[in-house]
Image: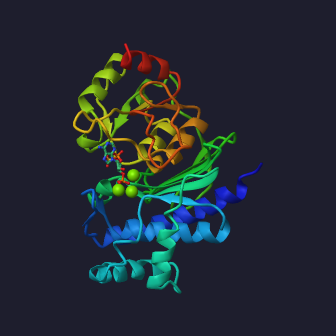
Amino acid sequence: MSYDREKQVAMDAAIAAAKLCQQVRQDIPQAIEKQDKSPVTVADFGSQAIICKALGEAFPDDPVVGEEDAAELRKPEMAETLNKMLGYVQSLIPDATADRVTDWIDRGNGSVSPRYWTLDPIDGTKGFLRQDQYAVALALIEGGDVKVGVLACPAMPVGGREPGMLYVAVRGEGAAMMPLAGGELQPIQVVSPEDAENLRFVESVEAAHGDQSRQNAIAQAAGITAESVRVDSQAKYGIVASGKAALYLRLPSPKKPDYRENIWDHAAGAIVVEEAGGKVTDMYGKPLNFADGSKMVNNRGVVVSNGVLHDRVLAVLNR
Ligand SMILES: Nc1ncnc2c1ncn2[C@@H]1O[C@H](COP(=O)(O)OS(=O)(=O)O)[C@@H](OP(=O)(O)O)[C@H]1O
Ligand SMILES: [Mg+2]
Ligand SMILES: [Mg+2]
Ligand SMILES: [Mg+2]
């Protein structure tokens, strides 16, 4: 079956959401604290609204499993935030209203199903707030297999031009990237073992999201001598997929041994790397499970590589 329409709708929606995010970021957004103490901004909500609206119109039967929901925003004390967010959405969708945007956001409260989308409207909210990297991440999953993935990375450097790169993949069709400012999709490939300059590894900026000392020790033992490059969000998957790094390691934080990864933090990135010729598993070599729920309860950590390095990294990790 062809996923041309899914790919196009997902790309257009992610590009529109990325525009909103960049507009919000120019105005120096405020962080709102969620119940789990993690930050969210009007851009996270606006991005989810725009993408869920587009998916709802194009694929009304598809559930969307998104990170955010509008319950807090509907509270009277959040009226100012809601209004601010609405203003940004209206710059792209003039007939948006407060009721409509909150409904669009809540389309993201769907459940994992035989066919569903998963959405992280801003992955790397902390990076977004720091003016560093972040990604709008959207993936279509069917029968537990990711079929389409789109990653918009509005802050990704694009040699000499306005920053912003879009990465996209369809199962069986390869991966490609395109500057967000416009241009053609260009096929991408993971790095080959001969390309010593790009045999570096990437990890999260936030120390609490992984185990940086172990990540560095494992990468060294697997033969990567250069220091890690720390990047926020699924931009790390885009960097591996486009051959700018050979490895992305995300090992469980010793401080949060019970943390389980969310599907929306990995699905889009995973297909982009796989279709660029790389490999993605958990730290024990198990495939990431997108079939059972919004958390990958039976996976621990994530190993993303150019493929060639993968077995060596797993061997070092599990010896
Ligand atoms: N303890 C712990 N362990 C692992 N992962 C965690 C943890 N806490 C949060 N998160 C998730 O990390 C998402 C941000 O991605 P990164 O960690 O790759 O980027 S960053 O460098 O930390 O910004 C972040 O995604 P967003 O909430 O979309 O920003 C979280 O879902
Ligand atoms: Mg978050
Ligand atoms: Mg995330
Ligand atoms: Mg997020």
In this view of the protein, can residue 210 be seen by the observer? Answer: yes
Q: Position of residue 230 (x, y in %)?
A: 31, 40
Q: Is residue 10 above or below residue 29?
A: above
Front in this rendered view, residue 57 or 204: 57
Q: Residue at x 35, y 71 (%)?
A: 42
273 on left or right of 79: right
> Taking the image as drawn, is residue 223 in sight?
no
What colour scheme governs how the chains and residues are painted in the rendered image of this protein?
Answer: rainbow
Q: Which residue is depicted at the point 28% across and 29% down? A: 227
Q: Quadrant of residue 143?
A: top right
* Picture quarter with the C terminus: top left
- Please provide percent x and percent y for residue 302: 42, 34
Q: Residue furthest right?
A: 1
Left or right, 294 with respect to 44, comes to right
Q: Which quadrant would residue 197 be assigned to in this image? A: top left
Looking at the image, residue 268 lies above or below residue 35 = above
What residue is shown at x 24% (from left), y 33% (from top)? 254
Position of residue 297 measured from the top left corner of the image (x, y, whole percent): 43, 39
Residue toward you, 207 or 292: 292
| Numbered disc total | 0
* Picture quadrant where residue 213 is located: top left
| Residue 113 position within the rendered picture, expressed as x and y whole percent measured from the top left | 60, 52
Image height of 248 relative to 85, above or below: above
Toward the top, the furthest residue is 319
